[in-house]
Amino acid sequence: MINLENRISNIFKNLKLENKKAFISFTTAGFPNEDTSLEIMKSIADSGAHIHEISFPHAEAQADGPIIQLANIESIKNGINFDKVIGIAKEMRAYNQEIGLVMMGYLNNIFIYGIEKFAKEVSGIIDAVICVDLPADVVEEAQLKKALKNENIALIKLITPTTSDERIKTLVEDAEGFIYSVNVAGITGVKSAEIDKVNSQILRIKKYTDLPVVSGFGIKTVEDVKNFSQSNADGVVIGSAIVEKIQEVSKKDTDKKNIAKFVEDFCSELIENLNS
Amino acid sequence: MTTEEIKNSLRSGPNEKGYYGDFGGRYAPEILMPNLIELEEAFDAAINDKKFIDEFEYYLKEYVGRPNPLYYAEQLTKKIGGAKIYLKSDHLNHLGAHKINNSLFQILLAKYMGKTKIYCETGAGAHLIATAACGARFNLPVIGYMGKDDIFLQSTNVLKAKLFGAEVVECVDGTGEKGVLKDACTSVLKAWSSDPEAFYCCGSAIGPHPFPKIVQFAQSIIGKEIKKQILEKENRLPDAIVACIGGGSNLIGSIHEFLDDHEVALYGVEAEHSSALTNGSVGIMQGFKSFMLQSDDGSATLDTKSLASGINFYSCGPEHSYLKSIGRVNYTYATDEEAFDAFQLLCKSEGILPAFEPSFAIAQAIKLAKDMSKDKIVVINICGRGDKDIDTAERMLGDKLGK
């Protein structure tokens, strides 16, 4: 294990002292448009979210369900691109220095942008990267990991219900930041997570690593979050549920402040229920 | 000579991580990794199991109808006035396309692995009906993913698949408005992620490792037959082999046997508006690295268009990108008009109705043959028959067909 000391490791350290769990939010950069998406992220930071995942959209998002898929397509249609997503991350960091920032998406954007160039560009801005389609066996994994490590940025590993213990052991060996435990076999925002299975998977992971384990996929409602407050997870990721809220409210109201406020209230309620 | 005996053989396939040179790989979400590894192990075991291979060969003969003829197209040859043109007749296979070679192989592999449910994607529907038929034959339920637009264009194939008992799921892109092969590919990967116990029968030489290798292995029967038949008929290898390419399964199947025969020129013909190898750049999507038609920042594929649904694809199999990078295969494209002319020419000159897909290959082969002397030999793989395309042909010809 590599002990990367950065904002994220400190966030988990502090939460542990307070016996709290990390609330990790996820929104799509550029959705419903570039400006509003930044405003939403700022308000999420204001709500007290510990870590925020800035999703850089991809049209062929293999691991995403219809909600995030639609947000991806809409944001791409509205002119978002990878450069602009990095710009959003920079503005977010300027706005808030405490929140952990993760960029999450598919490898192709980073590959096209240039792995080294990307790592340098986001240095001091983001704290971790999640690449959905970057297993350990592809050549870019080691390249990206090294480039990010030079900038003190973690490359997050995902572990799923289909991952064997043997595979977990190897995956966590050089993991950094935290482990992302995927709760369901499937795509985002469709199936509901079952708390018993979630817990046993997290315990399975914790046998092999001391890194914090966060739980994602299939956590949708305040009720779900309440349940997860009792789980073995060190944090929960809420993605599709937030994006769905943004979809709903942005249909009725185009004012970015109003949309952002709505999302802030939703996140505040979730955080309250996670750490009550 | 076997592959191992040839130094630096081009036929030795991908390395242990699934790369052909810089291309290919296994860019899959973690949820699919155990499946892909399981599949790779089962594939390696199956192809070294004589019983499995015997069964595959038995059904290729008895069910698919192989070997199909390597037909000397004498009339077409005369009309063009250059090299001798031979047609490899994969359009005469059961169900009228090369796709069944692969579907049969993978359904047998699924059975070998004890799988009980099959997912597949399709463009023109040829892979769908072939997989549905094999699923029916071997008692495995098939769920096929097909783009909304393709369902409209290829309704008879949808009907056939349903008659064979398959379920057909309509796919669209994120907007919900349109859907073609790439949307079917993304959808089927999601379906498989959500149901990892099932078997995914990939229809072309694309996708994460080991799919390109599996499809190449199954389709290589085409080239093996070409080699045997041309040696029997002409006592020598052809000067050129031409096939169309979308994902690239019929092309890799036609040429793989000849990759080390450097005297044989190899041609892959894309459709003009989906010409990833000619006009694309290197990217990583849907599990593999290859040339693709993509937006500047790699967030999306570009819209593609072709008269032939089956080759209307934004990318191509990774082995083709590799073969392009080393210059072993010549990749070109033909326009819809050229393909449609070639389609009619084959109808009129030989009484053979090709699908629109191989019509792109015919268009290129004609150009090639014209400039070659009469003692040269060109082989075209007619990878499918045109029954599925006659409504479109009728619309395009209008009054020219006569009352």
Image: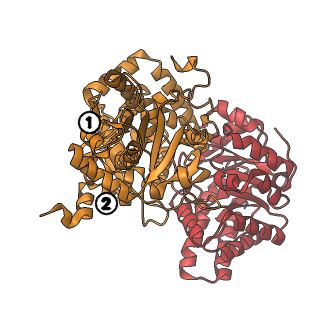
Q: Nearer the viewer, residue A161 or B373?
A: B373
A37 over A160 or under it: above or below: below
Q: Which chain is orange?
A: B
Q: Chain of mark 2?
A: B
Query: Which quadrant of the structure image shows residue B176?
Result: bottom left
Label 2: state its secondary structure. Answer: helix
Label 2 CA crowd tier, 10 Å (few <14, some 14–19, many 20+): few
Residue placed furthest toward the right: A5
Tell me if residue B162 can be seen.
no
Amino acid found under the numbered disc labelled 1: His
Label 1: state its secondary structure. Answer: helix
- Which residue is at a point 66% across and 30% down the rendered structure image? A166
The image position of residue A60, as x and y in percent, is: 54, 56
Amino acid found under the numbered disc labelled 2: Phe
Instruction: Name the residue carrying label 1.
Output: B94
The image position of residue B367, as x and y in percent, is: 40, 48
- Which residue is at a point 67% across and 72% down the rendered structure image? A37
Going from N to C along the chain, the mark reached first, 1 or 2, is: 1
Image position of B285 (left or right of B48): right
Image position of B328 (left or right of B296): left
Instruction: Name the residue carrying label 2.
Output: B152
Q: Which chain is red?
A: A
B280 over B227 or under it: above or below: below
* Residue mark closest to the camera, 1 vs 2: 1
The image position of residue B281, as x and y in percent, is: 61, 53
The quarter in which the C terminus of chain B is drawn is bottom left
Labels 1 and 2 in the same subunit? yes
Q: Chain of mark 1?
A: B
